[in-house]
Image (tube, helix red, strand yellow):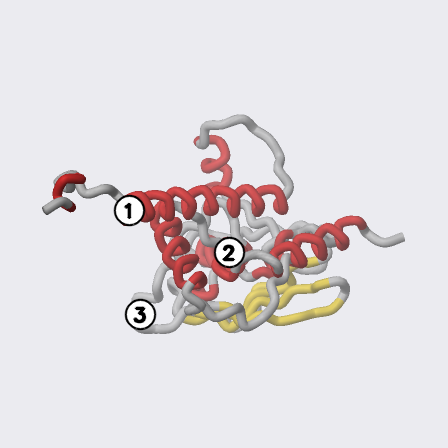
Amino acid sequence: MSDPSDNSTTVLEEWLSRQPVWLQYATQSLLKGEHFGQKQGVEYAEMAISEIKDELAPLDNPLSLSSLGVNAGGAVSLQSISNVTGVAQLNPRNPLSFGSEKIAVIFGSNGSGKSSYVRVLKHACGAREKGKIHQNIFEGASAAQSCSIAYADGGETKTLNWNPGAGVAPELSTVDIFDTHCGHSYLASEGQTSYEPRPLVFLSELATLCDLVAARLTSTIELKFKPCRSFRPNMLLR
């Protein structure tokens, strides 16, 4: 029997392939962890206008929604993080291994690098409260930050070479990273406690952006065609 979640992923991907190109670009950004506000509403409204003028190139690759976790949940698990450069004072000789269990706990003495490792993973996996990845002050501000993250996906071991500029890695976004800061974020945030599947959150974010873009386009049209207050019909008569 086929997994119904596989079909829902395919349906969403096919639906997105028929949507305007600007919305596909927005989807790509959303999958990387971007959040939409007024600024993004202006940017994507301009992109929509460019598309109308045939000035917007299509995406290089088809969109993949595997990072939403609508496929077999729990299939991806972290195995280790290594080759860390430019991050705080981390200079590991050996990879930090997470073992083969589904839950791993990082612990150690103060100053051992726990928080730095966790911040990197929160950024790569897309945690709620990511925090800032601090630069290695001994290497200078220009030192590139990067690491290698090994993970298991459906029994196959893979390695991702990651850097902060890449944002949330789609292949790791179903991995949950939790620390004290995440706990405080949940406790301090106001609102009703509820669970919403990632695909629905994803569609809600797109709907929010569409409203922002529509509002921006409407205001642009109104300004463009706003009647001139100083114009009088008898000005046409001589």
Numbered mark located on residue 153 in the image:
none
Spatial CA span between label 3 and label 2: 43 Å
Kindly indicate whether the residue at mark 3 contacts the one at mark 1 (C-beta within 8 angstroms): no
Q: Using a 10 Å C-alpha cutoff, classify the residue at mark 2 as few (fewer than 14 neighbours), some (14 to 19) or many (20 or more).
A: many
Mark toward the start of the polypeptide (1 vs 3):
3
Q: Using a 10 Å C-alpha cutoff, classify the residue at mark 1 as few (fewer than 14 neighbours), some (14 to 19) or many (20 or more).
A: few
Residue appearing at x 71%, y 53% in the figure: 11
Q: Relative to the observer, which residue lies in front, 155 or 41?
A: 41
Q: Relative to the observer, which residue lies in front, 216 or 237?
A: 237
Mark toward the start of the polypeptide (3 vs 2):
2
Residue appearing at x 48%, y 31% in the figure: 187
Amino acid at circle 3: Phe
Q: Secondary structure at mark 3?
A: loop
Q: Which residue is mark 1?
A: 225
- The nearer-to-camera label among 1 and 2 is 1
Q: Which residue is mark 2?
A: 23
- The nearer-to-camera label among 3 and 2 is 2
Q: Which residue is mark 3?
A: 138
Q: Secondary structure at mark 1?
A: loop
Amino acid at circle 1: Phe
- The answer to which quarter of the image holds residue 156 is bottom right
Q: Is residue 90 left or right of residue 95?
A: left
Vertical placement of residue 55 versus 119, above or below: below
